[in-house]
Every structure is written in structure tokens, then in C-alpha cells.
Image: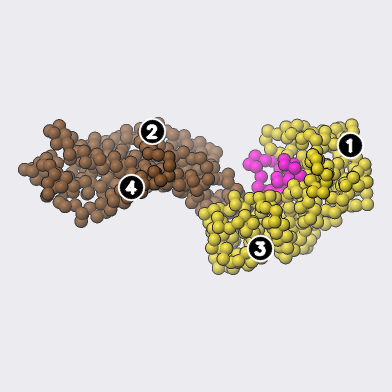
């Protein structure tokens, strides 16, 4: 099977070397980083040294110190605490996007690929319509209708990411349904729906999950971008994208730390998700060979 | 067909035991975009407990014929004629009846077991799923039957918990055979079941199929292009050419006294280890393309007995004198009356 995952140009092209040992340590490093981030997010209330919203204006923009290891932002809030607590919304949002786009995309792709005919035409054309509309614009549109909050941008981006998953699923199903085992099940008297859900779906799942892992990184960027534009999470919520937005004025005053650190977290997390996702996709491709 | 059939086994009666496992009458099958039918009037019967071989080269329609018994036909195929499995017409069944047929009455063994078994499911799941989901059997009943069937094909019950990747090709083909037997079918279709296996495994699998056919009383239609195998395993043989039955009869009569030039040529081109070194004998030319209309005998352009009548009129299937069950469709079958083989 030769299935190319959907990758945006540039980002996913980071390949240190083609040799396996070289890729292996990068993969392990990225996996370790992701585990760390997830643990930080889960244990945030116990790990963050200060209340992430405690304002101390007298101490604004102070550099790293013993009390505040990563310094404080323009309102005197502890950057380390905001980064740790911010990991929660920053990961929860993309998780919602990925869950929504995967479940809906797989449903659409299965129906289109398995049933074929007019249903395939209808679903494929409709999802291409979504493709034609930039995801971020769609999100801005929906946020401007429904107001700030996490739900609206997550649903909007979920819809925007659906075509990536549904297209991939459809092409996988088309390849899978030609395989002899599908016919062997038919001969045993199984109905098409049974074969599709019980046998074809598990066989294509690894590739779809690899794509969703990569999508997670993109969704993180898009949501951070929305937050940076002030359209994502509400003002006081700690969130990496929001922190970049809040730190913007501090950069102009010559104190860039509170804006740069969340940027670094976003970039590292997205790269890690890409590397892990691609590695999984490669493993699936190798299994099929 | 309106030609009087003289095959003695082909007498459908009300008694279930005498109903042939498979009875194909005058099957025509057309595909869109072809100039002539892919199958043009195929008559074929497989009695209960009988092994019938269907031989022919690639594209002769032997696979389509065998698949018609399960109605596994190309999407836009149009059919005429009747295909009866255990007395029921497959071509007119509704989806429910068709599923029941596929679960219980007829089963198929595929060429490459490695491709035909879902690699993600344990062997036990593969064997029992059809009974559990489509026949309403409980998991315990289905597993008990699966264990018995695995033992019948010479595998231990331990294979139930293994994944297809952990079994060899020969063992997987045994699993495939066990799966075919799960629904206690009246008919098993084996579409070149040994092609993907090595020679020693082939012999085992063929012997096994023959034993099981006897033991379970099923009819077996064996599709192959291996004439030696067909001669060894089958009671009767059908030779197909360009969508028609060229010759049919008891295996020994057909292989020792072929009456159709195509059968004779096929037998002649079988490689023999004791023959002197040199080029392998082959039949000159190519089978007619599916885009050609046929007026006469489809084999005429490659036949050394061909005369004018062969290109003008389609030969009818007629019994060979003194051999009522040996039918041949050739204008010049009498010219082959003397043994040409081993000449």
C-alpha cells in the first residue's frame, strides 16, 4: 500500500537522516517530550509553583529569580506556572479537534469508499468544498458568530480538518476492499456492513491514527494562532497562544522572555507530534510491505 | 439447453440425496463492453460426494463459472440460464437467501490463503465468526465446531489462538479448508487451491480435500489448470475453452481417449520428465479475444484438424459413440478416435 499522509509543506520535511538509528533517537526524544508535556498538563495544579493568575504589578517583567525561575510577565504573573497550566488548554483544544475530525472523517470516508457511487460523489465533493475554504478563516467566522471560548474554534477546526481524514480513509478503504480477504468474508455470508466495520476498519486504523497524530500538531498551531489573534480562549485563561499575545507589548519594552517561552513550547510540541506521527506512519508502511 | 442431456447423474428428483450439489444449465454471462458472452451456454453438474475438475487456460471462464455458484460475479454482469446449488437457483435469490447460501450451502477455498485471511484476526475468530454472526450459534458451539474442523484438517486446537502470520502457507490453507467446512456445505468450490503452495504441501492439501469430501459428503468443484492434478483427484472433468465446455467426461476416458483437439493438445503440452530434452510442446496461437465475435468453433484458428465447417458453424455438444457420459463439442471428434497421446 502506498498511502501518502497529508502533510503541509515545510513543517513535516524535517528529516535528520534516512538511516534508522538516526531517526530512532529523535523519535524517542520527541516521544519523551510529549509524555512530559502530557504529564505537566495532567498534574498542573500540583506542579505549578504559583497561582497562574496571581497578579503582582510591582514585580512586572522581572527576570528569572529563585522565586520565579522563568520570570514574570507584564502583569507580574509567574511564567512557569502559566506555561504549566496553559499546557492544559493548549493540549485539550487540539485533542478535541482531532477527536472530532477523526470520528467524523472516518465515518464520511468509510461511507464514501465502501458504498461508492452517488454517495461517494456527494461526500467527496462536499468535503472538497471545505478544503477550498481556509480552516483558520472558517474558525474566525464561527468565533465571530458564537463569541469567545474553546468550543467554537474547536468545532470549526474539527470541520476544517475533516477532509484530510475522510480523504485518507476513503483511499484506504478503496484499496482495502479489493483485498482477497474481503471477498473471503463475503463468501462466508457476511454482510457488507459487517465486513466494513469489523474487518476493514481495524485494518486501516493505524494509518488514520498516524494522520491524526500529525493533525494534532497542526491543530495546536491553528488554535494558538486564534488565541494570539484574541479569538480563542477568554482573556484570563492561561494558554500558550494567549501568552504570546499578552507578551507582545513586553517584547517592545525589551523583555521578550514571557512571549518567547510559550513560542518555544508550541514549536517543540508541534515538531514532536510530527516526528512521532510520521514515525508511526512509517512503521505501518513497513508492516504492509 | 435444448440438447438432450445424457449425463446419468443429472436427474434432479425430490429426494435430497439425489439433488446434485451444483447444477449449472445453459449459463450465459455477458459483461459490458465485450463483443461476445464471456460464458456461452455452460452446462455443468457436480453430484453429491463427487469431485469434478474444471480445467482450462487463463481467461477461459473457469473461474467465473465456479464463482457463479456463489453469485460472486462482476458488478455489471448480466446472466441467463440457471445455477442451482443443492436445488436452489442462485441467480434469482434475494440478499437474505444469498447470505444463507454462502453461510451454509456453498463454500469457497481461495488460491492464496495468506491474502484471503484477515491478518488482524486470530484463526479462531476467522473460523467462528460466520456461525456466530450469521447463523446465531453461541460462541461455545462455534468454538467446539471450529476445534473439530481444525482436527479434521490435521491441526491442533491450539491454532485457534494463533494469528495468521504465525502459520505456514500450508497450515493456512488447512485453516481455509476448515473455514469452508464450518457451515457443513453441500458444495465446496476450490479455485486453484494449491497454486500458492509448494509441491509437497500441494499433495497433502489435495489428499486432505479428497478425504474430507468423502467424510462430509460434499460435492467438490476443483478449478485448476494442472491436468495431472485434475486426472489424479477427480471423477469427472470439464475442459473449458473461450467460455464454452469443449469436452467433458469421466477422468480416465477424457485423459486416455480425448476427443477434442484442444484436450489432446493440452495433454500433449504437459511437460514430462521422461521426454527427451528440447522445446516444450505448446499450442500455437492465442485464445480468441473477448472483443471478437465468434461464428464457428473458437478453437478453429489453432486446430490442425480445422476445415471450412469449423469456421462456419459452432459445433454442438454430442456424446461420443458408446460413451454416453463423454460429451465433446467438435466437428471432427471422430478423427481423434485412435489414441493420439503418447504417439
Q: Mark 1 or 4, which is nearer the eye? A: 4
Which chain is depicted brown? Answer: A
Q: Is residue B74 highlighted in magenta?
A: yes
* Residue matched to label 1: B305
Question: Residue furthest toward the front?
Answer: B277
Nearer-N-terminus badge (3/1): 3
Which x, y percent locates residue B91? 69, 48
**Residue at 76% from the left image edge and 61% from the top image edge:** B49
Q: CA distance from mark 1 to mark 4?
A: 77 Å
Q: Nearer the viewer, residue B320 or B209?
A: B209
| Numbered mark located on residue B153 in the image | 3
Residue under label 2? A9
Marked residue chain, label 4: A
**According to the rendering, which colour does chain B have?**
yellow
Category of crowding for the residue at label 1, using alpha-carbon neighbours closer than 10 angstroms: few (below 14), some (14–19), many (at least 20):
some
> Where residue B190 sits: x, y (%)?
70, 53
**Pointer 4: what residue?**
A29
Foreground residue among B32 and A46: A46
Q: Chain of mark 3?
A: B
Amino acid at each position: 500500500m502506498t498511502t501518502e499522509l497529508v502533510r503541509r509543506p515545510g513543517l513535516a520535511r524535517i528529516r535528520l537522516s534516512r538511516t534508522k538509528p538516526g531517526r530512532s533517537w529523535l523519535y524517542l526524544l520527541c516521544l519523551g517530550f510529549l509524555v512530559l508535556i502530557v504529564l505537566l498538563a495532567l498534574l498542573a495544579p500540583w506542579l505549578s509553583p504559583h497561582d497562574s493568575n496571581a497578579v503582582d504589578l510591582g514585580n512586572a517583567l522581572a527576570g528569572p529569580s529563585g522565586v520565579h525561575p522563568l520570570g514574570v510577565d507584564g502583569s507580574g504573573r509567574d511564567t512557569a506556572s502559566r506555561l504549566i497550566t496553559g499546557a492544559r488548554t493548549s493540549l485539550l483544544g487540539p485533542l478535541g479537534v482531532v477527536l472530532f475530525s477523526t470520528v467524523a472523517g472516518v465515518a464520511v470516508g468509510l461511507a464514501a469508499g465502501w458504498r461508492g457511487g452517488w454517495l461517494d460523489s456527494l461526500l467527496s465533493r462536499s468535503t472538497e468544498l471545505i478544503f477550498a475554504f481556509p480552516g483558520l478563516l472558517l474558525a474566525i467566522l464561527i468565533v465571530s458568530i458564537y463569541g469567545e471560548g474553546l468550543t467554537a474554534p474547536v468545532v470549526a477546526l474539527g470541520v476544517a480538518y475533516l477532509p484530510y481524514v475522510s480523504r485518507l480513509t476513503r483511499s484506504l478503504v478503496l484499496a482495502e476492499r479489493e483485498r482477497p480477504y474481503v471477498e473471503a468474508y463475503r463468501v462466508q455470508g457476511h454482510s457488507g456492513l459487517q465486513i466494513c466495520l469489523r474487518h476493514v476498519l481495524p485494518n486501516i486504523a493505524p494509518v488514520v491514527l498516524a494522520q491524526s497524530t500529525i493533525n494534532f500538531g497542526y491543530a495546536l498551531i491553528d488554535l494558538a494562532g486564534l488565541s494570539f489573534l484574541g479569538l480563542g480562549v477568554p482573556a484570563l485563561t492561561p494558554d500558550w497562544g494567549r501568552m504570546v499575545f499578552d507578551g507582545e507589548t513586553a517584547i517592545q519594552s525589551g523583555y521578550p522572555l514571557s512571549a518567547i517561552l510559550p513560542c518555544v513550547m508550541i514549536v517543540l510540541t508541534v515538531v514532536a507530534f510530527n516526528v512521532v506521527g510520521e514515525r508511526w506512519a512509517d512503521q505501518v508502511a513497513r508492516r504492509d510491505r | 439447453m435444448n440438447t438432450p442431456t445424457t449425463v446419468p447423474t443429472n436427474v434432479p428428483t425430490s429426494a435430497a440425496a439425489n439433488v446434485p450439489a451444483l447444477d449449472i444449465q445453459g449459463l450465459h454471462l455477458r459483461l459490458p463492453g465485450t463483443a461476445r458472452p464471456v460464458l456461452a451456454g455452460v452446462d455443468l453438474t457436480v453430484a453429491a460426494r463427487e469431485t469434478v475438475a474444471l480445467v482450462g487456460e487463463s481467461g477461459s471462464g473457469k473461474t467465473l463459472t465456479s464463482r457463479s455458484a456463489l453469485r460472486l460475479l462482476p458488478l455489471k454482469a448480466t446472466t441467463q440460464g440457471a445455477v442451482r446449488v443443492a436445488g436452489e437457483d442462485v441467480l434469482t435469490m434475494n440478499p437474505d437467501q444469498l447470505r444463507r447460501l454462502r453461510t451454509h450451502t456453498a463454500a469457497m477455498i481461495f488460491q492464496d490463503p495468506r491474502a484471503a485471511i484477515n491478518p488482524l484476526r486470530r484463526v479462531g475468530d476467522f473460523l467462528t465468526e460466520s456461525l456466530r454472526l450469521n447463523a446465531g450459534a453461541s460462541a461455545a458451539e462455534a468454538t467446539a465446531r471450529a476445534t473439530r474442523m481444525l482436527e479434521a484438517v490435521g491441526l491442533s486446537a491450539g491454532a485457534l489462538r494463533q494469528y495468521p502470520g504465525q502459520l505456514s502457507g500450508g497450515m493456512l490453507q488447512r485453516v481455509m479448508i476448515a473455514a469452508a467446512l464450518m457451515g457443513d456445505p453441500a458444495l465446496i468450490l476450490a479455485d486453484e487451491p494449491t497454486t500458492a503452495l509448494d509441491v509437497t504441501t500441494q499433495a497433502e492439501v489435495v489428499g486432505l480435500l479428497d478425504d474430507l469430501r468423502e467424510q462430509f459428503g460434499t460435492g467438490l468443484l476443483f478449478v485448476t489448470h494442472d491436468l495431472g492434478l485434475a486426472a489424479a483427484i477427480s471423477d469427472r472433468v470439464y475442459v473449458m475453452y473461450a467460455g464454452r465446455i469443449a469436452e467433458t467426461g469421466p477422468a480416465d476416458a477424457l485423459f486416455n481417449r480425448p476427443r477434442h483437439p484442444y484436450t489432446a493438445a493440452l495433454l500433449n503440452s504437459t511437460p514430462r520428465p521422461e521426454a527427451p530434452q528440447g522445446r516444450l510442446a505448446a499450442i500455437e496461437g492465442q485464445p480468441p479475444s473477448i472483443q471478437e465475435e465468434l461464428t464457428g468453433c473458437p478453437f478453429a484458428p489453432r486446430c490442425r484438424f480445422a476445415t471450412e465447417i469449423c469456421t462456419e458453424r459452432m459445433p454442438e455438444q454430442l456424446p461420443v459413440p458408446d460413451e454416453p457420459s463423454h460429451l465433446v463439442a467438435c466437428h471432427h471428434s471422430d478423427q481423434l478416435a485412435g489414441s493420439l497421446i503418447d504417439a
